Amino acid sequence: MAIFRDYSTQKRDRSASDRQRHKELVRKKIKDGIADIIAEEAIIGQNRNKKIKVPIKGVKEYQFVFGKNEKGAAQGTGQEKKGQVIQDNRQKGGQKGIGEAGNSPGEDIYETEITIEEAVNMMFEDLELPDLDRKKFFQTEAETLRKLLGYQKKGIRNRLSKRKTMINRIKRMKAQQPEENESFPFHNNDLVYRRLTIDIKENSNAVVFCIMDTSASMDQIKKYLARSFYFLLYTFLKNRYRNTEIVFIAHHTEAKEVNEKDFFHKVESGGTMISSGYKKAIEIIEQRYNPAIWNIYAFHCSDGDNFSSDNKSAIEAATALAQVCNLFGYGEIKPNTSYSWSSMIDEYKRINEENFIALKIRSKENIWPALKKFLTLDKNGVLDD
């Protein structure tokens, strides 16, 4: 495809806008295909500066090449208009008979390299924690040095203006006219320091509870999917929100607060009482995070296997937790290879809180769509039945 542009006599880089458009197309292709790349097991826990390859289809920067006298090539008539698009009429893939290979060029595919951090930032640039401004009048203040107000004779060493200090030394040296080989050291009167104003930046308080089922029924595949989901969530939070605290809770029949390393890597056993995880979160909220001041978000991953006697308590605890949260998301890990059909999804349909979302995650391809549904408050339910 080609686009006609008006000729301009101005001395400027006429191809700059084309290159910028090409970059934007490449960026869009990367964003569209990055979800499958980022969910790969090899990426979980890798160095953020590690480079990964992303295949890009059908994006090529145009250039002049020698023609091959193919049909459909012709010169312009002079009647073309600005913005008019000329289509390539060659059949994509070429004409072929049954069992024959195509004889025309197909779609261009090439790979580009980006770091994991760049990929994650592309994925998350359109997402925000919902309702973060609900408690915006409760904020912490952080001091940041912003604007240069001028210069002063006294200050701390890291604000020394080397340029101004050097100019003062040169002026003094010319005034005194020392001998050619005479050393001329800096003097205290030469020193000049930058004077900066202190800018106060307000940041909303937010805490995110990551709750994970670590019981014996959570096999290796389920735990991998849960940890992959939390890896994306955790990376999103660390990249986007400066003043966000994260609490990790692991549960089986009992729940406990753990550190990041134990949350992602420690293996537990035993049965499952989902209510224990919710009650532990509520307990921590009562002790440390006043809902009147903090934006509170909770996410729970489990395979849905729960003692039936705990179902009522789990619903009650989930309702209570949702009532103090901006958002409470439940992701039920049900791999296609799983033979377990017990589920809390139907039980959770009895929860009428608007900020509670429950859905199933069956494969690594569901991880990114699940996170988007949670963060955009999309209550369309199950991703894949």
Image (cartoon, grey):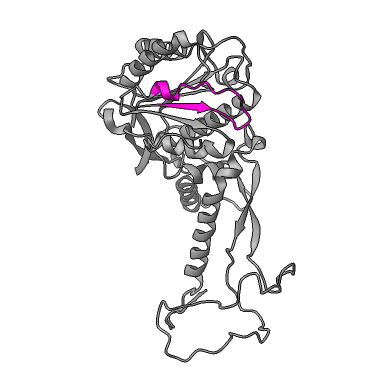
Res 202 seen here = no
**Foreground residue among 159 and 41:** 41
Residue at 51% across / 7% down in the picture?
254
- Image coordinates of residue 35 in percent, x first then y, are 55, 44
**Foreground residue among 213 and 187:** 213
**Foreground residue among 89 and 242:** 89
- Image coordinates of residue 160 in percent, x first then y, are 46, 39
- Image coordinates of residue 309 in percent, x first then y, are 45, 8
- Image coordinates of residue 369 in percent, x first then y, are 48, 40
Which residues are drawn in magenta?
329-348
Query: Looking at the rendering, which quadrant does residue 292 occupy?
Result: top left
Please count the marks in the image.
0
Q: Residue furthest front?
A: 98
| Horizontal arrangement in the rendering, residue 1 relative to residue 268 (left or right) | left
Residue at 56% across / 47% down in the picture?
34
**Foreground residue among 243 and 11:** 243
Res 139 seen here = yes
Taking the magenta stretch, the answer to whether it contains residue 336 is yes
| Horizontal arrangement in the rendering, residue 52 relative to residue 141 (left or right) | right
Instruction: Please say if 216 is above or below 196.
Output: above
Taking the magenta stretch, the answer to whether it contains residue 170 is no
Residue at 66% across / 87% down in the picture?
69
Residue at 38% across / 13% down in the picture?
317
Instruction: Please say if 75 is above or below 370.
Output: below
